[in-house]
Every structure is written in C-alpha cells, then in structure tokens.
Amino acid sequence: MALKHSSALPPEMLRVFETLPQPYLILSPALYMLTASNVYLQLTNKTRVGIEEQYLFDVFPKIPDWSSEEGGIALSLSKVLETLQPHQLPVMRFDIPVFDDQQRLEERYWKTSHTPVLDAEGEICYIIHHTEDVTRQVLAERALKDSLDKETQAAATAERLRRQIEKLFAEIPAQIAIVTGPDMVYEFINPRYKTELFPNREVLGKPLLYALPEVAGQPIWDILQHVYKTGETIAGNEINIPLADEPGGPVKEHYFNYVYQAVRNDDGEITSVLSFKYEITDLVLAQKRLEQNEAELLALNYGLANAHEEVQASNEELQSANEELHTTNEELFRAQQNIQLLNDELEERVQQRNIELFNAQAEAARERDRLKRFFMQVPTGICVLDGPEMVFELVNPSYQQLFPGRDILRKPIKEALPELNGTPIIDILKSVYYTGNTFEGKELLVPLARKAGGTIEDRYFNFIYQARYDAEGVVDGILVFVFELTETVLTRQKEKENEQRFRFLLNAMPQQVWTARPDGSLDYVNEVVCDDFGQSMDQILGRSLQEFIHPDDRQLSSKRWKAALQSGTEFMVEFRLKFHDEQYVWHLARALPLVENGQIRLWLGTNTNIEIQKNNEQKKDEFLSIASHELKTPLTSIKAFNQLMQRTADPQKLGNFVQKSASHVLRLEKLINDLLDVTRINAGKIEYTMEPFNFLEMLKDSIESVQQATTSHRIILEKADDVTYTGDRFRLEQVVNNLLSNAIKYSPEGEKVLVNCSVHADGSIIVSVEDFGIGIEEKNLMRLFDRYYRVDNTAMRFEGLGLGLFISAEILKRHNGSFWIESTPGKGSTFFFRLIPETLTKTVPIADSDTHYQDDTITIKLNQQHKRLDVDWIGFQNLESVQHGCLKMQDMLIKNNVSKVLNSNIHVLGNWSEASDWGNTEWFPDMEKAGLRYFAWVHSPSVFSQLSARKSIYTLKGKLAIEFFTDIKSAEEWIESK
C-alpha cells in the first residue's frame, strides 16, 4: 500500500477544522501535521505556522510526559496505517504547562483517538488526531470512587457494629425495655424481656398501663414517672411486680433487681426511660436509622450507575459524530453540547453525592456519639479488650466503678488486673479470642481487689465475653459485658445459711413442723413429718393436712381450720394422723398465722405426738375404774364379815369370819402398797438397800410365802444354784412374789408353777417362773411391763391393778437386770429375769482387726467374696453389749467400704428390748450415713427378742432395705441378690 506524505485540504474544510470546538489535529500518512483546530493550538500553546508541514514528533519532543506516552501514540498511529481502521487509546494522563509565574504543570487526562480518512482508491488521505479533555470526568469518577469506598467502609463498620450490638443485646442475660413519653409507651423490648415475661402478650407500641393494667397503683408506676420527670437513676433489688402471663389472666408475683434510667436526646431533654434487668437495651432506633441510611445509599448508588451509563452512551455518540465529522458539523457541535451538559450534570451529581455522603457520615458520627453516650450512661460495666494482649481500649464508667481508682485504660488485662493471672478468666478470654465462641458466665466467683494493692475479695459477676471482628471478619478484640452480683449472692448465701440453720432446728425438733400457704396447702414439712407419713417432701407438699387425719376427727379439724383461715386466729385441735404403718397416732395441732402488712403470708404449725398422754389418760381412766372396783370389793367384804361377826356368838363361825376378813385386809394392804410403790417410783424416792444376801434362801422364802396363800397350785422349785448376790433382798423378793402371783392368777386351770434359778458362766443369775395358763398373744408381749396394763382373756377378767409387772420391771432396772417373756396362747407363759453381779468382768476381745472382730457376745467378719459383713450375736445381751457390738459393726462397715450386713441372732439368749429404742433413733440412722443399704436380720428364737428387733426399725421402714428371716440360708439368698 502506497502512503502519501501530504495531502492538501480544501479551504472550506480547513476552516471547518479550525473552528471545531474540540482539539483536532490533521496528519498526513507520513505523520506530518497539516492543520489543527484553534482549540488544539490553544491547549498546546502552538501557532498554526509553527506546526504545518512539520513532523509530529519533531514538534512535541519536549512536552512533559510525552515520551512516556509516545510508544502508545506511535503504536496507535501504526495500527491505523496498517489496518486503515480507527483506533481508540485508553484515557491517559498528560499534564500541560501553565504559563504563569510558577511555570507549573497542570494535571490533565485525555481520551485520544486516530481516525483514517480514505480516498476513492481506499488509501489514507490523512489521519484525524482527536484528543478530548476528560479531566473533569476522571477527577469526578475518582472522587466518586473514593466516596464510594469510604461509604462502603463506613457502612461495613456501622453494620458490623450494629450486628455486634444486636447480638450483645440479644444475648445479655437480662430484660431490657425502653418506654417513651409520659404515657410510657413501649418503644423497645429485647428477646429475653419478651420470652421471660410476656410470651403470650403484645406490648410494643402500647402505653404501659394499657399493655399491663395490673401495674396500676403499683410502686413501679410511681418509680417510672419519677425517673421520667426528674432524670434520677433508680436502682433496687427484689422489687415485687404483680404481672399476668396473658391479658385477663391470673396475676402472679414477680421479683426483680432493676435499674431505671432516663434517656436524653441531643438537646439533653428526657424522652424515654430505660428499664434494665441485668441486660442493656437493644439499639432498635439506631438500627432503623442505619437501615434507612443504607437504603438511601443504595438508591444513590443506583442513580450514579444510571448516570455513568448515560455518560458512556454519550461518549459513544460522540465517537460516532467524530466518524461522521465530514458530513455534519452541526450534529457534532450539538453532541459536544450534550456531553458538556452531561459532564456538568455529573459534576453536580457528584457534588450532591458528596454532600449526601458527608451528611451520612455526619449522621453515622452522631449515631456513634449517641451509642457511645448510651454505653457511657448504661448502669452496666462494658469494656472493649483489643488484640491478643487484650488491652483495655474502651471502659465505660460503670465498669470503672468496679475498680475505683485503678488505672486500667490502655493497659493489658494481665497488667491492669494482675490478680486474674492463673485464674480461669484468662483462659476463658483466650478461648473467646481464638475461637470466636461467646462465653456467658452466671454468678461466677472471681477473686478481685477493688483498689490497686487492696485486699482481694471474693466477688460474684454475671458477664458475657463476645468476640469483636474487623472488616475482614477476623477477631481483633473482645466485647465485655459485666454486672456485679456480690451483694446479692452473699445476701442469698446468708439467707440460705439462715434457712439451712432454721431447717436444721425444725428437723431437730421431735414434733411435726409444717408451714402452709394462706389457702391452707402445705409448702414445707420437716423430716419428722416425712418419716411419720412414710412419704417424701415432694409427695406431701401442695396437699392439705386434712388428707392424713382420721375420718372421725376430720370434720372437727376441718371446721376449726377453715375458721382459722377466715379469721386469721390461732388454730388448735387434737386429731389422729395416719402413719406409714397404717396406724393412727394422736397429735395436738397448733398453728399461728404470720401477718405482714395486714395480709397472712403463711401459717406455721406443729403437730405434737400425744399418743402416750392419750394412752395414759385412757389407762388412768381404766385404772380409776379398776381401782375403785378393786378397793371397793375387799372393803365391802370386810364390812359384810364385820356385820356377820356382830350377829353371831358362835366361836367357830366368828373365827372363820375373822380369818376371811383378815385375808381381805391383806389384799387391800397389797393394793395400797402397790399404789405407794408406783408413786415412789414416779417420784424417784423408792429406797434400795444394797447388801449381800443368799439368793437361794430369798427365793425359797418367797415361794413359801406365796404357797401359803394358795391351795390351787403347787409351786415347784425345780433347780436352784446356791449363790450370794448383792442387792435389795426385800425388793427382789417382791419381784418373785409378783411373778408367782401372776403365774397363779393367769393359770386358773393349771395346777402347778415351775421355778428355776441358775448361775451362768459369766456369774449372772437367771430366774424363770413358768405357768400353764392362758398364755399371752404376741401383740401384748411388749406391753406387759407398762403401768396399769392387764392381760384380759375374752372369757374372763382377773383382779388386780396391773401394777405388779411394772413395779417388778423398775426394781430389776435398778439392779441393772433385764427381763423377757416366752409365751404360747392357750399353753402358758414363762417369765425370765437376769441379774448381773458387780464383779462381772468386761468383755475382752478374742480377735480385733479391720476384717475380724470377736468377743464373748459377738463375732463380726468381712465376707470378701460377697462384699458384706457377717455378724453373729452370742448369748445374753444387754444395752452395754449391744451398743458395743453395733458400734464395732459400724466402724468395720466404714473401713471396708461395704453396704451389706448379714446379722444373725440365732445364738442370742434372753431379750433385746433395752437396746431397741437406741437402735431405732441413733444407730440405724448412723449406719445409713456410713453406707449401709441392705440388712438381712435372722431372728432370735425368742419371740420377745424378735419383737424388740422389729421395734428397732419401727420408723425406718422404707429407708433402708431391711428384711427379717428365720434361717441363715434364706437371708444369704436375699442379700446376695442385692
């Protein structure tokens, strides 16, 4: 292709080019300048004569920055010459000199294109070099981009802050609400406020008294009004606010620790009240304003995008106009005007956008200021720990008040609070920082000093540690929310200690103790109630005491209880309560109301067991009836015989009447002596003369004395060892006389009474009196030695006051003796008593180790195979021997860490009754604490001893697994299955 070095332009074309409002340069194919527009010459500070027919790169060799762009321009021209197609260069910076005093360069940006003009042969006639000054557009776009970047960064920061605050408010373990205006309209509530207080109520946007009418007249309304009117912050603990779960529902009492604080606007005016219950308020208003700003920013971005598209379209139209320059200069001029207008509009939009951005940034700054002011005013400690060293970056006044006078700001936490080193707090903070997981602590004990160098105190806090994230989503710090509860926790602990002490005192009382709500339902009972009823506290609470009262007593009790509930007066009544063994026991109930502010808060009551008093009253009544009869009978007989003696002169009859009258006098004397003895025993004034005597002689004298008074029975002394005993001979003879008299009395069809006396290997004396009479049923055996108790057969009644055995038992106890009975109904009974000499030596252990103990009364072995203790009681037992063996058993149970005992009484002789009460009230409870869970008890052959054993667990039934057996094999099978 041949290129032309020059080409002449018609004069009219030259004038067109010279007057174009854009910088144009006409080049020959050899890159010689043919002409240029006036605008081009003005921009380059050249004259038309100085450039025409000059080589392009000769004219502009010294223009600044031309050389750096030359390759681009030369390459563009080469492509045009090679392809005969227009070529567009990218926008480039090309500063131009400003000819003023400073001779400076002005920053300019250009959009350059090269368009070939072809002749009829398709060869290039000349090249149109067009340069468009786009400096204003480039600078505007750069400013727009910078503003968008700043806006994006500010929006991201605001959004991150919003999310962090929103999460913090949502997770704060407290209830937060904001009420606005004098009507206290609910403006905001956080999730916990909603879910914990009003899951079934809608309160937002409603005045407080409309949403919660039940608070009308309550102190809370006056407090809120006071805060709103005065701006005073009010905090308190355990305020009682009656609230309903749903509209119209029943009102329930709620208790709160609270802080109510006024919220002010930028002018310092009170607009709202912040209700804070261990949580800070959610920034709903701030969130809504940020969302509105975000929406506005998005709308503006959309407008800028449209404007940018319009500019692009205008540029394309301009390029098209340039290509058609040779056909229509007017269209080119109009397009230029449109472009100018668009540039002006774009600049105006950018300026407007900058103003809006500035306003948005100012609003964001104000929002941050309000947020910071809010954080600084909130009555909860808040701080920000920065970086892995956890430097205190922000500390609000409430947090600083936790450490008055301590300089902690801009210090690492380990330096600011050195007492935390080595505590779990530092590890928790590290975990939050490196994992991003939020940690919530409730009533956590943290040893901290309030002042620098001060005493380290045990302090309790509720707190949240929440990770803070930077713009890239990387953890760069920790947000800390903390609320001190030391006073509350210590007060509650003190109250708990007082309550425990109070409950201990109540449980230590032997009476049933209970409290009831104002409606009469039980809300507390002590352990005595649970033990007596055989039920747990949870099973009893909420019920009425009337459920346990005997049906015959329920009407009177219910009447008096209802009267007491209505009048608030003392409740007192006697009734029978049903125990776990289905037996009813008499109690005296007494209850008093606890009145506060004119209202009954609770009832405190006691039920005192009066079964013994009732029984004594019954026995007393029976005794008076019997005594009057028993005393009247001999007196009537004596009176009758005296009248007969006055009427007869026959010496034989007279002697017979005197003898019979004398026998009734002796009977009356015995009744009176028994009554006197009982009186002396009760007063502790019965006297004993302890001196050595021949026990066998005393026994024979007693038999002879009783035998002389009866002809219906023969009293036979089968066996008697000769022994000397130190004691009261007269009183012990009285015991034998009572046993012999009873044997004769209760065996009317019998003909003999057998007496035996033997000396045991340990020196103890054992006496037995056996009759062949009516016998005694098992249920009556344990009561025989009670005062006034008499065994009555359904077919007959026996004379006497029922005092003989009671007196005998007391005499034997004073001699450190014991007694027991073996009886078969319809066949007869045998009464035993045992006397221990003072010279009896204490038991000496045969074996004594942690796994094996043995003496004359007990053997205890650890059964390693079955993890239990095997116990074998031997011979006669008394209170001392039983207590010694039981305590040894308890010691071995603990040392060998076992929970099972196989207890055999097969080899026991005599009774067990003296130790039964001690076993029931002391030993078995202690064994349970020591770890006892299963107790297999093999009966003694003695029925009296069996009854004593069962009495030992009377009130323990159901607490421990205790079973009775008659043989070892059955006991082993049961306990091995456990």
Image (spheres, rainbow, N blue to C red):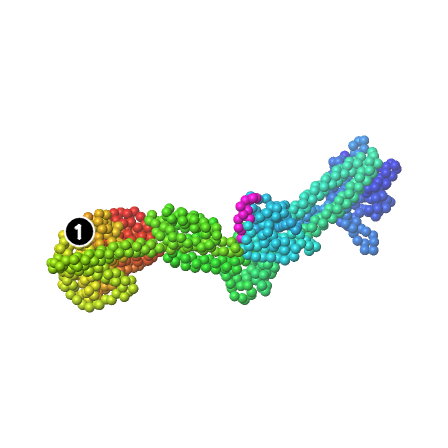
Residue 677 visible in the displayed image: yes
For residue 57, side relative to residue 909 (left or right): right
* Residue at x 23% of width, y 47% of height: 794
Residue 921 in percent (x, y) is at 33, 57
Residue 904 in view in this figure: no
User: Which x, y percent locates residue 709?
Assistant: 15, 58
Horizontal side of 771 relative to 518 (left or right) equals: left
* Vertical comparison of 129 with 175: above or below: above
Element on which disc 1 rests: loop
Spot the residue most to the right.
Answer: 11
- 158 or 591, nearer to the observer: 591
Image quadrant where one finds the N terminus: top right
- The residue drawn where x is 54% and y is 58% is 484
- Give the residue type that dot 1 points to: Pro
Is 760 or 707 nearer to us in this picture? 707
Position of residue 676 in the picture relative to residue 520 (left or right): left
Q: Which residue is mark 1?
A: 748
Q: Quadrant of residue 887?
A: bottom left
934 or 124, which lies in front? 934
Q: Residue furthest top?
A: 120
Q: Residue at x 46, y 59 (%)?
A: 498
- The quadrant in which residue 890 appears is bottom left
The stretch of residues the image draws in magenta is 243-256
Q: Specify whether 356 is left or right of 188.
A: right
Q: Residue at x 74, y 44 (%)?
A: 91
Residue 775 coordinates in the image, percent (x, y): 20, 50
Callout 1: few (<14), some (14-19), or many (20+) C-alpha neighbours within 10 Å? some
**Which is more toward the observer, 541 or 424?**
541
Asked whether 407 falls inside the magenta stretch, the response is no
Q: Position of residue 660 (x, y in %)?
A: 16, 58
Residue 245 part of the magenta-drawn span: yes
